[in-house]
Amino acid sequence: MVARISQSSSMYRMLNYNEDKVDKGIAMCIASGNYPFQPEQMGIGTKLGYMNRLMELNHRAELKAMHISLNFSPSETDLTKERLTAIADAFMQGIGFGKQPYLVYQHYDAGHPHVHIVTTTVRRDGSHINTYMIGKKKSEPIRKNIEQEFGLVRAEKQDKTQQYRPEPVSPSKVQYGRSETKTAIQNVLGHVLSKYRYSSLSELNAVLGLYNVRAEQGEESSRVLQHGGLLYRILDPTGKPTGVPIKASLIYNTPTLKKLEENFNKNAERSPSHQARVRSAVYTVLKGRGIDLKKFAEELSSKGIDLVIRKNEQGFVYGLTYVDHITRNVFNGSSLGKRYSAKAVQERCMLSQLESKGIGAREVQMLSPKISHGTNSTDTTLLQKSWTSDHTSSSLFSDLLDCLFTTEYTPEYIPYELRQQKKKKKKKRSIHH
């Protein structure tokens, strides 16, 4: 079981998010803890009003609404309504919210069983429940106890490369009305924003693009950009935006640029071990022979890392981004070092292709006197060091490419008649009288 906890200042957005799915038939409110009525006896007005009355008792706290998701392994198909309710009750008791009013929603819109819980951090006496470090201090210990008590699949044993990844938005299935587009985008954002570590909008878009969604600041002269706004769009199979753009302020949990920038700053410093994992995977894959950019991406994917290739309109590859689904980190290639940038990886792939065709250092020397100068080794070790060494640039291979693909200019290729210089015309002297 994996638990995710987030907080907000708006109870309406949290409830509306779940109730909207109930209306669409992809969710059900299965339990109401410490409410005077059963879920089927209440409309959204009653559910919301009861929470809001408590929240109004405390004017100092800002984030008084709390949203929890409990996610289970796809293999756990025996999670009945009663069992999910019992798990939710045990979790709320364990984190100190057993006496708070809360609503439990079972969702059916993902490939794994999961429930959402909505509650408030304000007690009946108006005091505020301290939620600092609630994930580490309370959620993790109670999560492990619940896994043992209910015989659930342990979070540590679940396949994190596949777990809890929603299906990409299908542009052909979304009717491009505002509500359908908004729902599709919300599902992706709900998965990505709180779970992945990204330090820029381009890194965030690398993850969102895997699900056919993109965040845009608008064009230079647009009001959206001038006012620091943000739009979310659905992408078609060619990567172009299509459908109705949705403002960030209209989406559940309001993922505005200001909020995202807080995440950018928080995620600026990433764990060295997480960076090392991606570097190690890249290095291991590129050691093989016959590796091109497509095969490079496939090999990384098998290790839980998606490679996002950024191209311009002419198809030129100008950037690589690595999305690690194991550690939930996103890294632009250049932030990992020069060897992981688009230029260096493409050069290493080209070298791999040459090696697979039997072109070694001896052939390189014959083809390129410039490279053979100072190169005495008869194998490809020295060329490989131009990529693998921390302190050596990839200039050797760049020189090889220049030698192989640049046409040599010699005067003999030009006919004699055309090589003759034209005689300069003598200027007539003007006679001044």
Image: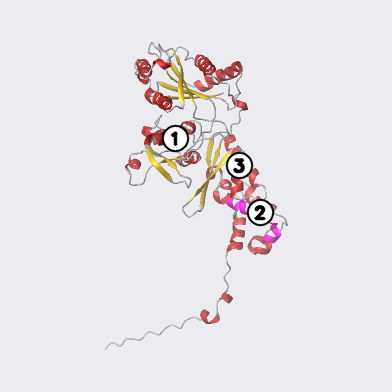
> Mark 2: few, some, or many residues within 10 Å (few <14, many ≥20)?
many
Q: Say whether disc 3 or disc 1 marks the residue closer to the N-terminus.
A: 1
The tag on residue 300 is 3
The residue carrying mark 1 is: 184
Residue closer to the observer: 13 or 430: 13
Task: Using the image, determine if residue 236 lies above or below residue 413.
Answer: above
Q: Which residues are magenta?
A: 346-364
Q: In which quadrant of the rendered image does the C terminus lie? A: bottom left
Residue at figure coordinates x 59%, y 57% from the top left: 398
Distance between the alpha carbons at the discs numbered 2 and 1:
48 Å
Of tags 3 and 2, the one toward the viewer is 3
User: Could you tell me what secondary structure mostly forms the magenta stretch?
Assistant: helix
Distance between the alpha carbons at the discs numbered 3 and 2:
23 Å
Q: How is the image coloured?
A: secondary structure
Q: Amino acid at mark 1?
A: Ala
Distance between the alpha carbons at the discs numbered 3 and 1:
28 Å
Residue closer to the observer: 237 or 224: 237
The tag on residue 320 is none
Quadrant in the rendering for residue 52: top left
Q: Secondary structure at mark 3?
A: helix
**x then y, percent, for residue 9:** 38, 24
In the image, taking residue 21 as reference, residue 377 lies left or right, namely: right
Q: In which quadrant of the rendered image does the N terminus lie? A: top right
| Magenta region includes residue 362 | yes
Q: Secondary structure at mark 2?
A: helix
